[in-house]
Amino acid sequence: MQTKKERKPIYSILIEHREIPLLAVLALLLIAVSLRVPGYLGNSWLNVLKNGSINMVLCCGMLCVLLIGSIDISITAILAFAGAVAGKLMGDGAVQSTIVMFLLGIGIGAVIGALNGVLMSYGRVIALIVTLSTSYIVRALIPMDWLLGMNKINPTQLTQAFKDSLINHSFLGLPFLVWLAVLVVVITGVFLKYTRTGRNLYAVGSNAEAAQMRGVPINRIRVLAHTICGATAGLAGIMWLAFYAAIEKGSALGDEMFTIAACVLGGVAVTGGYGKISGVVIGALMIAFIDHAIPQMGIGNSMITEFIKGILLLVAILLNVILQRVAEKQDLARRNI
Amino acid sequence: MQKVKSFLKSWEFFLILLLVVMCAVFKVADSVNVASGVSRKSVFYFANVLRSMRPYFLYSFMTLGMMLILAMGDIDISVGAIGTLSVVTLGVVYNKLAGGAEEGSPMALVAALAVCLLVGALCGALNGFLVTRFKELFPMIITLATQLFFRGFSYLLIGGETLTFKDPTFKSLSNLNQLLKIGELQIPISIPIYLALAVVFYIWLHQTGNGRKIFAIGTNSAATYYSGVRVDRIKFWCFVIAGFMSAVTGIFFVGNSSSSVKADIMDGYHMYAIAAAVLGGFSTDGGKGSVIGATISLVIFGVVKFGLGNIFSFPDSAVNLSVGVILILSVLGPNLLEDAQNRRKVRLRRAETAKLNAAKAA
């Protein structure tokens, strides 16, 4: 009896570690693709990582925003804007250094993110409305041909060193692009888990009033979360520019949904207060993997990826809820209620 | 008197004021244009603006559906994708029924339209089912997932192709695109249809008990439930109506888009619908807003887009920019005003207490 009591039921283990079922699904998908396309994993894992790293960076910022119970749908607009402005400056010869480009991107993103945060926290405008508006505004500012004579950033406008920086340099067999994503993930993970401010994000998300009573400056934390999100989006913009060597008004349009989807797949609660970086990493990997693997499987038409992503997200979030309900029921049953 | 006072304080009055100011600005700019010879003749007069409202009233039906959802404090970002899916099924079903004939029978078109509307309602029903059965999840996340699903389903049906229809029966849909002539005025057909629907919605939402329940749910869902309202059932049907309205928008979209159907049309339409509803006084918190406000805000967006595009000859992107600015200011402004009022109240009370204390001390 005693031993039975101490053993945790499998449901609650699955609930506590939401990334386990996700890993299982990822493994199943891998097996399915490998059966269909022999040697897929050996050939393509690097491409999956490369294609996924920009979304991975975006996901880190999105995680911070979701943790405080907010949302940011302007990230891809910020991505395109930061990339376009930095690219324009490089094309004009104002900026030549690669490092400065990255800092510039982060700076631009952080400013727009901070603006989002201020409007959302001090202006008490709902995050969805704020970021919807800023995404309109920011994206409208991109083709500034009526303002600055800027239309589209071409490879010719960028220095060779910049274009090479992420793709052609590698360390331990992985290109810098992937390492950059890893770096952002590690920094975000450490920040969220081991710093006081990081824990405050969770506190604000789980119960803002209680957090305020305990002396957490909730408005400042909210602005901070949005600033981080904007900064990662700006960084992602420069990564995009270096990876594709081009950026325009419509770049990454609508991709913010996949960033949110990756976070939700990774078990982040949109109500705020719950979410782990490990889950987000797996969620982002999963989206990247589906994006890359499904077209290679040669089933249906080329657009079937969209369909599978939709189904998968739907099933994943519903499964999460059902699992939680079963666990709660089992808990009650164990205590004879 | 009280009524007049409360009207002057209402959001609708502010919207009308905004509209008047904008019209005045555009009118002046237009006259300046004519006087300085930039444009040959005036473009900003009632009949011309009315005639040009067509593209801006495309998503008005979607806005009607979105209003219901926002009034309940939920949000539905899948409406654009529902429109796409229903239009794609419209095309596919019509192709099957007409069988590639030179001219399909009108019955085939009617049947296809019925299927289209049904698909819209069914998509809405799926949303409604998921939202009411899985309360742990935000409607935003559910509709995000169903949005990907619906759009993916459209891609599954026709892939990346464009279905183009040349036969006259299908082309007759573009009648929806024509202008109704009443005397001197030319009115896009979508406007009278929208107004008729808006009147129905107004009576339902603001004058019947059933409609007030929707606002009650948005104000306090639990309290409404405990006062005996079938919250889930109302929610479900509101989502169904929103889906249906998206299908209606889709049909108008096909009428407007030279009878071709693709799987990526109407992307981002949910944002237009949300923007119009929010400017109209609805909030994602639920419980407020009015049909009249939403209608005025549709007109405002139309006038702004027309004016910036045709008088100031701004490109589309600049027009989008102004939409964003209007949207954010329309929510931020009242909030800041309320803050200022609260601060003033606190200050007054403090002064009063200080006076009392001084009197006591004396």
Image (cartoon, coloured by chain):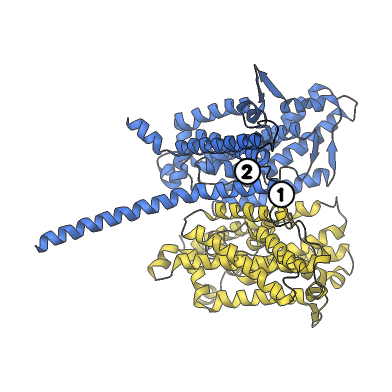
Chain colours: A yellow, B blue
Q: Which mark is residue B149?
A: 1
Amino acid type for the residue under numbered disc 2: Tyr
Q: Which mark is residue B272?
A: 2
| Residue at 72% from the left image edge and 32% from the top image edge | B251
Q: Position of residue A70 (x, y in %)?
A: 54, 59
Badge 1: residue crowd in 10 Å (few <14, some 14–19, many ≥20): many
A325 with respect to B224 (left or right): right
Q: Position of residue B27 (x, y in %)?
A: 58, 34
Amino acid type for the residue under numbered disc 1: Phe
Q: Position of residue A222 (x, y in %)?
A: 50, 65
Q: Is residue A21 visible?
A: no
B304 with respect to B229 (left or right): right
Q: Chain of mark 1?
A: B
Q: Is residue B244 above or below residue A46?
A: above
Q: Chain of mark 2?
A: B
| B106, A148: nearer the viewer | A148
| Residue at 74% from the left image edge and 33% from the top image edge | B256
| A213, B324: nearer the viewer | B324
